[in-house]
Image (cartoon, grey):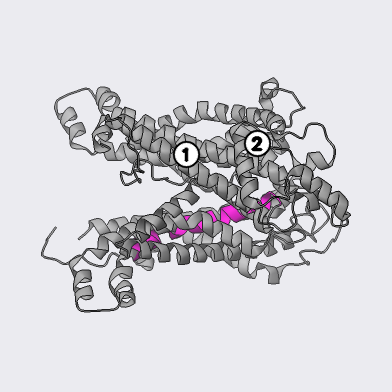
Amino acid sequence: MAIVSNTPGLSIETPAGPLTTSAHHPVIRFLVKRLAVGLLTLLIASMLIFVATNILPGNAAVVVLGRSATPTVLHHLEAELGINHPLAVRYLSWLGGMLHGNFGQSAVAKAEGRPDSAISFTLGSPLADSAILAGLTTLLLIPLTLLFGVLAGLFARRKLDHVISVPSVVMSGLPEFVTGTALIFIFFTELNILPPIALLNPGQSPFSDLKALILPVLTLLAVAVGSGVRQVRAGMIKILQQDFIRFARLNGIPEHRVILRYALRNALAPSVQVIAQNLQYLVGGIIIVESVFTYPGIGTYLVTAVTSRDVTEVQAAALVLAALYIVINIVADLIVVFLVPKLRTAIS
Amino acid sequence: MNTAVLPRRRRARWPELLAHDWGGRIGAILLFIVVGVALFGSSFAPHGSTVTIGIPGLGPSPGAPLGLDFVGRDVLSRTLDGGRSTLLLGGAATALTYLVGVTIGLAAGNARSLVDPVLMRSVDVVLSFPALLVMLLAVTAFGSSRTVLVGAAALVLFPGVARIVRTATAEVATKAYVEAAVASGERAIAIIRREILPNVMPPIVADLGIRFSWSIILIASVNYLGLGLQPPTADWGLMVSENRGIISTNALAVIAPALMLALLIVAVNLVGDAYVRQLGRSKSEP
């Protein structure tokens, strides 16, 4: 499932905002504008997350203690979790805490009297594990997307194109849990060469059991590469029909040079956006892939928190994921602007 | 191209589409079969979909050709029954997506005021969240019910439709025939219905396949995570996850629902792609 929104990105109509910086250089102005819009989006996102997690009647204290809790005990826990204040007050204190790296206390852990109830403490390890999973996927994702996309574009409507494109179309359309389950069936049930789960002991590094990472990475790759290949292929076909390619060929420039120096270079800029979309996809895709393989990352953390209605944990994980999503989008826009000189004049 | 010829209405004709396009043809046949199974399969089910009939995880037998699931229910009966929720919830979410998306797109595209930027910026906010995260937040906020699943999927998907409709509307709204209709004092509703809507239809329909398959995937994924439809409901997404533990004893309990889901999505995408190809063809030919 490669559901990636095409956020406004480079569209020139992005609201300027009343920025009166002295920066006159178009790229710097674009950068400042883009960062401002990004920060504003993040702020709105944090509000929406906070409101959404506070809509449900029966707060965390009720959920944790059960409906039969005595009013005194309930009141005590509410005060301890700070959920007896009005919504706006709680939002501001929550946001303030976030800015100081204080993600609050896990409501469930606190009620159960566990010592490790601080979320900034419990969130670190899942986040690192997810980063490793996403990092490994990215390392393979970029070369594979470009290689298959360019090849399919060069051999458009020929055999090699079909061999690449047909599986890409199928893979990019399937939900991760279907692909993941199919891989488990093939490599565990039938061949029995790879483990079906990637469970780690507390404190265990994902690198200590690389074999367990193969299937989660493959699942993410299947979806992300599949959708990326289609777009890079389309971009490549479009470039190859341009006049400057025809003229380069007519000038007798060797074909490999035409492709490497002329076509590929121009196909690269749109590809950066395609790859950025795929990285954004990973932020969402990791949620379900981690669940399929019970990998202890941020996705599993979020799903567990939603299941146990641990509101503070949901807020923290959701905000981290939303922030990553927004940051990737901004970085991608900046890279594209630096790669394509034409856009630098367009944005001024 | 002869410029004197008025541009024809760009419409893909379905029979033509299926006669010339292998992808579309295969997709249509697959879609017909899977939708048939999803809608009417339960009346041919040999057993009740929530009845325990034997040992959990038992392999295929004459009485149960696909074996039994993790609590001993007939996998064939549950697979025949589990597509209805997938199809209907996905269909409802798609319908709601278009209802909201087209309304907002038309309003923004026609408005020559602050309404346009305000609407489109609010739409952008939704796009700054990963899709599945929106679904999970919706479930956290409103609990797991069919209404929440449909509403959340529509919330994720309507911005795309709104954008497409807004762009197409803004383009048409400045055309002379629209100006003429405005000048002759036609009511806004009539202008939208007669002049604008027919022109924004092709891009809307071209997108239908993708939105429908995304609706199905989003809802199935939430069901898979156990945060959507609750047991003992028979649902393809839920069945894949609840039978994970018995994949070694009766893999069919996982494969049957997963395969049906995969076939449905591939079929929808094939038909959608064929329509887009047809649209492109009729656009390039005068």
Distance between the Cα atoms at labels 2 and 1? 22 Å
Residue at which label 2 appears? A298
Residue interval drawn in magenta: B201-226
Is the residue A135 above or below the residue B109 in the image?
Answer: above
Q: Quadrant of residue A143?
A: top left
Q: Is residue B220 magenta?
A: yes
Q: Position of residue A73 (x, y in %)?
A: 87, 49
Q: Amino acid at mark 1?
A: Leu
Is the residue A43 above or below the residue A52 in the image?
Answer: above
Q: Amino acid at mark 2?
A: Ile
Q: Is residue B268 visible?
A: no
Q: Position of residue A306 (x, y in %)?
A: 70, 47
Q: Looking at the image, which is closer to me, A230 or A23?
A: A23
Q: Looking at the image, which is closer to me, B106 or A155?
A: B106
Local packing at callout 2 (Cα closer than 10 Å; few below 14, some 14-19, many 20+) is: many
Residue at which label 1 appears? A39
Judge from the rendering whether residue A325 lies leftward or rightward of residue A97; answer left or right: left
Which residue lies most toward the top here?
A208
Q: Give the total of numbered labels.
A: 2
Q: Is residue A44 magenta?
A: no
Q: Is residue B70 visible?
A: yes
Local packing at callout 1 (Cα closer than 10 Å; few below 14, some 14-19, many 20+) is: some
SS at mark 2? Answer: helix
Q: Quadrant of residue A130?
A: top right
The residue located at (80%, 53%) in the rendering is A62
